[in-house]
Image (spheres, rainbow, N blue to C red):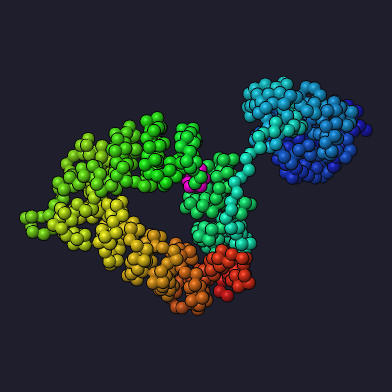
Amino acid sequence: MPPAGGRRAAPAEATRSVPGEALRDAVDGTETAGARRGTRMTNAAGNGTAPAHEPESAPGTPSAPYGAANGPEDAPAVLHGAAKGPHGGAATGPVSASDAPHGTPDERHRAVGDTHSAAGGPVRAAGGPVRAAGGPVRQGDGPDGAGGRRISGGSGEEWGELVAAALLGAERRRPPGGSVRALLDKAAAETVRRRAGARPAVPGRRPVPAPEDTRTPLPAAAERRLAALLADRAGGAGQTGSAGRRTAGPDLGELLPQWLAEANAQGYRAPAALLPALLDAARARTDLRAETLAFAGPRALWLARYNPDWKFALRDGVRQQLPDEEPEAVDKLWQEGLFAERMALLSAVRRRDPAAGLRLLASTWRTERAEDRLMFLDALRQGLGPADEPFLERALSDRSRTVRATAAELLATLPDSALAARMAERARSCVALDRVGGTGIVVEAPHECDADMQRDGVMAKPPTGRGERAWWLSQIVEATPLGVWQERLGGLSPERIVALPVADGWRDDLHAAWCGAAVRQGNAEWARALIGEPTEPFAQGPGDPAKLLSVLPEEERGAWAARFIAAHGLSEAFRILGVCGVPWPVPLGRAVVDALEIAREAGSYPWSFSGVMGLAERCLDPSDAERLAPLAAVPGEREGESPGAGAYWAESFQRLVATLRLRSAMLAELREHDGSSQAEGDGTDRAEHDADRPRGT
């Protein structure tokens, strides 16, 4: 017999979800909703009855609401809780408009617009019939770039009220419509209405076509290689094992800088389809920007105007097209352009004509913001000369402390500037030869930091753990032209000055300040004297040897680093290797490989040297691959050796050899202008085979 109300209990398979569950289905998606209903129907089948709280629906009506796979964009998951009544029970009621069936658009609109359910009962949808279009079109409803605007009846405040009511609960605030059931009906109807349709937006102005790039296109093999390098950078898969250990495959993303440098050297243009991925890579890694933007060419600038994520391209060197012979256009761009455009313009003008760049900056200096003044002032490093001194002297009185410090730093690099002369006078009063003892240097550090010193860039407050007088002395000596010391200290050469003893424990402070001055002024003679022979570890020497090495010629850097590794091993070599040229000179490469072999023979684990091994993969000459191939064999374990160390070392050398072979194939592809040859293909296949070869084979 039919139950009370004249409605027959539906079988479990044909039950329909109530409005609250329809909303849960819409947010959860069809798979989650289906799993939930499947569990409920299984339980109901075991009892022999359908769930009592669910009304029946027409046979064959799908159980998922229209759009269930795409939950409402702004419906919070907390609305799931609104499916419960005031006392925690499930909400009940007739089928709501959110339960519109799947099917063709006409069927869905008929189902939504009908005011009666398939079973003959009334459909409640926010208090009345549901219109297919839902109401007037609001200009702000459509997502950007969707090609149209979303049609939405009612206001955003109405949806906000529904969300707020669901968050607070019926016990704390009376829901719209007076009941939880009405709240769910309103939310379901609003969801359907917001999805009901869209109309095209007003067509915008068609953008100007991208400029032509007349450079040589990439060979096909090189283009495929670039796509693989970019895909590996974006995915990052396959570079570490399950335990976080590096796998035997090459790290393709780390080879991208070398690929770009070689492509630019060969004069190729970037494939149009890969420009977005290239710009994304340059956005994520600042070390890639210069080479990436040079390779991407004028089309990168064109793209950057349409994507704010790529605005760095306007600032970091792509804008090379200056309006030549059009000073009005330059002035207009400088006065009205975006900051990135103005920064690029100033840098480009300074490269072409330093005096014109200075005039451009001076024309608006007083009206610029402090942070912009700092960036613009830093751009004067390019082409810095005596003509910039009057402007920089005025900047010493700037309101911003960072601007004053930058101006003082720039003036200190001009040996004939007035600031350098003032610093030299202060330094002479602090450092002198020991006339009493006959040899050595005596130091009398400043006793105060007066206003004139602070105006010239001397910071009064020292870093934590450093004395005031030592801090003031180091800043004065570092800003003093190095030529002053040969005159002040008896005409001695830098090597002999550095060898002099320094009284009263001031040696480390004085030598560290000289190191800073050598790096700032780019003085190779003083850098060579201060770095000396690599007989002492870093902790026992003044300054930073890596910075001093960067001042020396490239060949000299490699030779010094090779001697350092031979004397001290690889434990402190990482920073030194980072400033050496690529590829490493032959003596340096052999020193690194010999040190790695010594570490393996000593039974050390290879991940202690993972940083050096990674540099070796990128910096060793690719022609060394065959010479290093025997090191990739798995040696037998010896007594006293760490368990598994030999196999791990073999895996590391396999990775090294595979990467070197891959670099060799990569460079060959770029140097073959008429397409990749069979030999290149063989080299590429061999490198990829080695990358996939299991450990120990």
- Can residue 341 be seen in this snapshot? yes
Question: Which residue is drawn at the image coordinates 29% and 44% (left, top)?
Answer: 386
Relative to residue 161, is residue 236 depicted above or below? below
Residue shown at the point (46%, 78%) measured from the top left: 638
Answer whether residue 291 is magenta in the image: no
Q: Is residue 149 left or right of residue 551?
A: right
Pinpoint residue 363: horizontal percent, then vertical percent. Answer: 39, 33
Q: Left or right: where does residue 118 sit relative to residue 500?
A: right
Between 527 and 649, which is closer to the camera in this rendering?
527
Q: Quarter-wise, where is residue 464 in the image?
A: top left
Magenta-tinted stretch:
313-319
Please identify the quarter of the rendering in which residue 98 is found: top right
Residue 631 at x, y = what percent? 49, 75
Q: Residue furthest right?
A: 1
Q: Is residue 377 above or below residue 126?
A: below
Q: Residue at x 61, y 45 (%)?
A: 210
Position of 31 relative to 227 (above/below): above
Image location (x, y in percent) of residue 161: 66, 24
Q: Nearer the viewer, residue 300 or 130?
A: 300
* Magenta stretch: includes residue 318: yes
Say above or below: 135 vs 687: above
Residue 551 in which image quadrant: bottom left
Residue at the image position 25 percent from the left and 40 percent from the top: 456
